[in-house]
């Protein structure tokens, strides 16, 4: 997400960073570039105008003129205004009601609403330690009810059955009554979607809302629809008292216009970003972190949180103890590290959060990411083709053994040699991490997997 916007803004702001003094004249071109970058990212025109005016007002005032580094002060202003545009901070779900707290999900068909119900249920169960019941009040699509039942089973939450003969209001009320009997903390109600906003749909969801009085009414919208996402959210907000927005399919949206427009147009906060198909691919929306990513500054905080959630703590503890005892970091440990990175969403997820290195063009990252993912798979195949003894002691791998391993993994002998060399580099890094400690050190070490620092295969 934001690849195109990041490319444009990073280049534009690099041009202004070194300026000794900023005046209305010499920031005019920069502001024009910022304006064009936002419009190309499909940000709504009124939002762009307001944003640029606020940046200009602050930039030509005393805030910059008194700064020792005016160019850097200008970048700080752009970042602060981006944060303000998207909301000052992450707004958590208001679940401090008498249980069960009810969450109503609204949105058009195809926005990923039912998938988001499953993701949100998993998020609440795993990260908030809540018991969750999900129910579908979509009496027009039998497939939607079946899909939610399957998702509930996958994420380990309670599913309340419903069928096409029932009324949506009756389904929702019965689900809440069941949750009370079972002392369940949260009920998530999935509602019917349409291909477009219509009066019948709005009337039905209004009735459901009035009957169950939810603590949260979340609008689920496809980020790839750009400005339309914000306009559709406004239509729903006019009909329903929305409390927040969930942007889905964010991983497929290179522009990011929806994320920058929704808050300004609806006045409602973005609470979550849907980053993929997997049930764990739902991230709380942090405006400050997203602003950093847009400006190419990375989002190491989210990266660390992601690592902590997906890390196999038992394996990590065993590895730390092993290294402290002076035992080497062998190829089985190396394979474990590759698998841990896969659990974090692969290189695509990491690249999105690591700071840009040496002005890397993010619009070219897709190709680099695909190559890197292919290399990861190849490395795993090579290690899997080794005997346990070879994995523990790579020094014993002679020329004939390399040929056997290459044949077994469908690779070349030189690929096996490169992997062994790369493993040695990783060994050195792991020694440093163990000696000095800290997740931040590990994250910096991961930059060796990035373009410009990524080992050649």
Image (tube, helix red, strand yellow):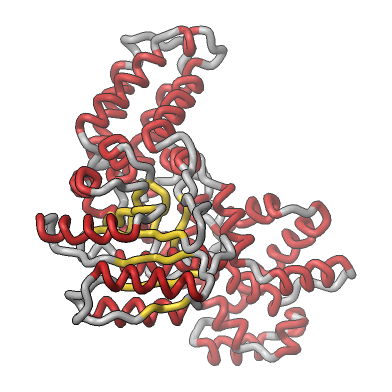
Q: Dividing the picture into quarters, in which one does residue 36 lie?
A: top left
Task: Residue at 39%, 10% (x, y): give it.
Answer: 60
Q: Is residue 294 above or below residue 128?
A: above
Task: Residue at 30%, 35% (x, y): give it.
Answer: 264
As rendered, which of 425 and 136 lies closer to the eye?
A: 136
Q: Position of residue 86 (x, y in %)?
A: 38, 37
Task: Residue at 61%, 54% (x, y): give it.
Answer: 304
Q: Position of residue 232 (x, y in %)?
A: 19, 49
Instruction: Please give left or right for residue 331 compared with residue 127 in the image.
Output: right
As rendered, which of 72 and 405 lies closer to the eye?
A: 72
Task: Residue at 40%, 15% (x, y): give it.
Answer: 58
Instruction: Please give left or right for residue 325 compared with residue 4 in the image.
Output: right
Q: Position of residue 219 (x, y in %)?
A: 30, 54
* Residue 372 seen in the figure: no
Q: How many numbered marks have been drawn onto this rendered protein structure?
A: 0
Q: Position of residue 227 (x, y in %)?
A: 21, 44
Instruction: Please give left or right for residue 29 compared with residue 231 in the image.
Output: right
* Residue 306 seen in the figure: yes
Q: Residue furthest right?
A: 325
Instruction: Please give left or right for residue 402 compared with residue 116 in the image.
Output: right
Q: Residue furthest left?
A: 199
As rendered, which of 183 and 374 lies closer to the eye?
A: 183
């Amino acid at each position: 997400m934001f690849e195109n916007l990041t490319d444009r803004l990073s280049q534009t702001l690099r041009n202004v960073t070194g300026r000794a003094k900023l005046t209305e004249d010499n920031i005019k071109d920069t502001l024009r570039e910022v304006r064009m970058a936002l419009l190309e990212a499909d940000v709504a025109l009124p939002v762009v105008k307001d944003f640029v005016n606020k940046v200009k007002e602050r930039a030509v005032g005393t805030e910059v003129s008194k700064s020792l580094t005016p160019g850097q002060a200008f970048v700080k202003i752009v970042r602060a205004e981006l944060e303000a545009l998207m909301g000052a901070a992450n707004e958590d779900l208001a679940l401090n009601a008498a249980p069960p707290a009810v969450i109503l999900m609204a949105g058009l068909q195809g926005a990923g609403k039912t998938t988001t119900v499953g993701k949100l249920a998993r998020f609440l169960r795993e990260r908030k330690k809540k018991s969750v019941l999900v129910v579908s009040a979509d009496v027009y699509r039998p497939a939607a009810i079946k899909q939610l039942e399957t998702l509930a089973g996958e994420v380990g939450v309670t599913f309340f059955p419903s069928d096409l003969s029932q009324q949506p209001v009756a389904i929702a009320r019965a689900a809440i009554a069941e949750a009370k009997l079972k002392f369940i903390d949260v009920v998530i109600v999935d509602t019917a979607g349409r291909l477009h906003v219509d009066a019948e749909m709005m009337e039905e969801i209004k009735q459901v809302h009035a009957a169950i009085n939810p603590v949260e009414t979340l609008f689920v919208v496809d980020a790839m629809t750009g400005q339309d996402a914000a306009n559709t959210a406004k239509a729903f907000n006019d009909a329903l008292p929305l409390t927040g927005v969930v942007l889905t399919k964010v991983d497929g949206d290179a522009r990011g216009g929806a994320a920058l427009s929704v808050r300004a147009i609806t006045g409602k906060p973005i609470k979550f970003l849907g980053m993929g198909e997997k049930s764990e691919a739902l991230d709380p929306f942090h405006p400050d972190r997203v602003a950093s990513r847009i400006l190419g500054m990375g989002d190491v905080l989210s990266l660390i949180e992601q690592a902590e959630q997906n890390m196999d703590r038992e394996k990590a503890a065993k590895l730390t103890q092993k290294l402290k005892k002076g035992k080497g970091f062998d190829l089985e440990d190396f394979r474990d590290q590759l698998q841990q990175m896969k659990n974090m969403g692969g290189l695509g997820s990491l690249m999105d959060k690591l700071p840009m290195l040496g002005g890397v063009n993010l619009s070219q990252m897709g190709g680099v990411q695909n190559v890197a993912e292919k290399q990861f798979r190849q490395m795993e195949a090579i290690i899997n083709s080794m005997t346990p003894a070879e994995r523990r002691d790579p020094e014993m791998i002679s020329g004939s053994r390399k040929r056997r391993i290459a044949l077994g993994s469908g690779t070349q002998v030189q690929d096996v040699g490169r992997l062994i060399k790369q493993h040695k580099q990783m060994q050195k890094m792991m020694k440093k991490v163990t000696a000095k400690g800290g997740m931040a050190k590990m994250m910096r070490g991961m930059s060796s997997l990035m373009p410009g620092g990524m080992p050649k295969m």
